Image: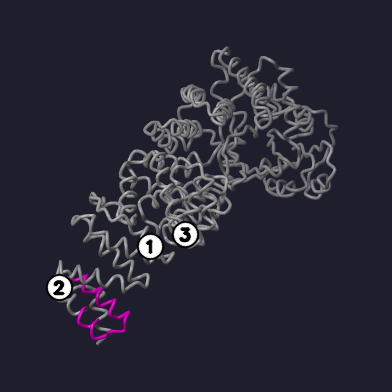
Amino acid sequence: MIVKDEARALGQCLDSVRDWVSEMIVVDTGSTDETVAIARTHGATVSHFPWCDDFSAARNAALDLATCEWVLVLDGDETCFVDNQADFARALQQTKYDGFSLPISSLNDDGTHSQAMVFRLFRRALPNMRYRGAIHEQLVAVAASQVRTSNLSSIRLGHDGYTTAIFASKDKGRRNILLSRKVAKSRPNDPFSWFVLAMALAQSDQDSMLESAQTAFTLLESSTGKGHGEQYVVNLYLAVIAVHQSRNQPDQAMALADRALQIFPDSPDLHYRRGENRMATKDFAGAAEDFTAALSSAASNFMLIVNPASVGYGSRTGLAQALRHMSRSEEAIDLLRTAITESPPTHFNAHSELGSLLLQRGALDQAGPILEEAYRRSPSGGGVALSLAWCLYRTKDFSGAENVLRGLDHDPKAAHLLARVLLDSGKAIEALPILTASPLPEALLTLGWAHLVLGQAELANSAWDSWSIRASGPNSARLLVNIFRVLLSRDPIQIPLKDWPLESLHEADAWLILLLRYQRHDDVAWVINRAPMLGCGVWPILRMRWVQILVLNDNADLAVPLLIEAAHERPDDGPVYYWLGHCAMLRQQQDEARIMFSECLRCDPQHPQAVQALALLN
């Protein structure tokens, strides 16, 4: 081991390997914490090496101190696990291979782990078993394919030193750039050196990163295939693809992904990246193919898994999104439910997508808890807050919706929804400035209603006229508004109206409820009187819907005449008598209520509410 300031994890590392080795050699490169004391306490032989900005020099100094045939190389933030002692022993006794790559699992910020293979176990005394490279150092014999190597799964490593907090605390980024430039300068014809520099620059200088990556690609192409299949090349492609995606350059990202998948057809990360790119370009069938490939067994067994989401919840969520666009919602729902069970605590996309899909289908009771969990995980995550607010709004939880939307004032759609929430919850005065400032044409429709319920009819009509000019939606939307404007109008001229589209009756319900909320009883009565103008095709249906709204909003006096009218027209309609009985109960006319509920059961003997109500009365 070579270490510097590894007091945080060194004891755990040495404890994990103590029972499997004959000697523990720790070379310290200038620690200022308790690293050296911890190493000695745990039984390690400690040597000091003056740091010279060269990891290879320090590694080789450590190798010089080793006395055993085999060497196991660890870092201070790693842990060793031996899963099969007998297999481990056989690996050290065999003569076919000179060294082994071991699986390493690296902790990510979200609690997931990335998987890779690292060459760490080898015979020490073979020719050229010396490190080179100031950073991301390699054994010369291994890089030149001068030794026989294989993979060994009976021993594995865990690593937690590259989470954001630990990486930043040690200022590894600046150090890596300095050392990587040194490596590239000393070995300008080595593609791996330029890969190392590209990766070091990825977070701070994308333009220079792309230049270094292109140099690496050029050297790889001129090397007649040598090194093309190494896992660092996968990382190089992934890093450059990510830059092009972040810059909204889908063509460049797609070309690179296509080229990389010709070399690594089973890489789940490459399929995942290309799937994301295809989603962005609306190639949903192609995206579905990529996400499916990332979920295959071949992908799960690939030598390198950088992003664990690619072989699980991430690809399932991406595949579900693609299938949703392909009108295969049921399959999408199943995938998302599985993705949710796999998701780490910080991942919200699967919850958000499933909640939005259920919301779109009107399954509000199911959508609500899922969207709430997505919002808890990521309050600022793309679209989560707005979807949750819509769900709360549609379930009449206006207070909850307002709380969610208050932090989204920068989003015009969120601001418009907030205005609708305020309007529907009796706060039209608060909604007015939001609607007036909105750039959205649909806000003018809502603005008209806000003016109307505040008694500003002329301003309401002006807003609706402007909306009608600017709105780009279907003509049916304009028809619905015009119909209701006629119903509200005091103009005595009878204007023939087309039947209200049956699929939009809920909008008429919402407008009537709004008038009732602001106690616009004169407007309500006027609308009800003029509503038969809608025609015999829609009025009987709308009348019964409005009866229920009136009764449930304590306006039974307005509902009773409508019910009597309906009873004359449809004397065998059970629900008409049920609601007459309900109104009688509200008026404490129990005998009348008993008669009406009995009449309901005459027409509909199985009417459940009437059966229950009559039983209570009796």
Are the residues flagged by discs 3 and 1 in contact, CB closer than 8 Å?
Answer: no
- The image's mark for residue 513 is 1
Direction from residue 368 to residue 224 in the image, left or right? right
Q: Position of residue 504 (x, y in %)?
A: 30, 52
Q: Position of residue 168 (x, y in %)?
A: 72, 40
Read off the residue under disc 2.
603
Q: Which residue is rendered at x = 81% and y = 41% of the image? A: 45
| Real-space Cα separation, disc 3 to disc 1, in angstroms | 15 Å
Q: Residue furthest front?
A: 492
Q: Secondary structure at mark 2?
A: helix
Direction from residue 41 to residue 355 in the image, left or right? left
Read off the residue under disc 3.
454
Above-or-below relation of 131 to 562: above
Of mark 2 and mark 1, the one earlier in the sequence is 1
Which residues, given as a range, are shown in magenta?
Answer: 574-596
Residue 286 seen by the camera:
yes
Name the amino acid type tagged 3: Leu
Q: Secondary structure at mark 3?
A: loop
Q: What secondary structure prevails in the magenta region?
A: helix
Q: Nearer the viewer, residue 34 or 368?
A: 368
Of mark 2 and mark 3, the one earlier in the sequence is 3
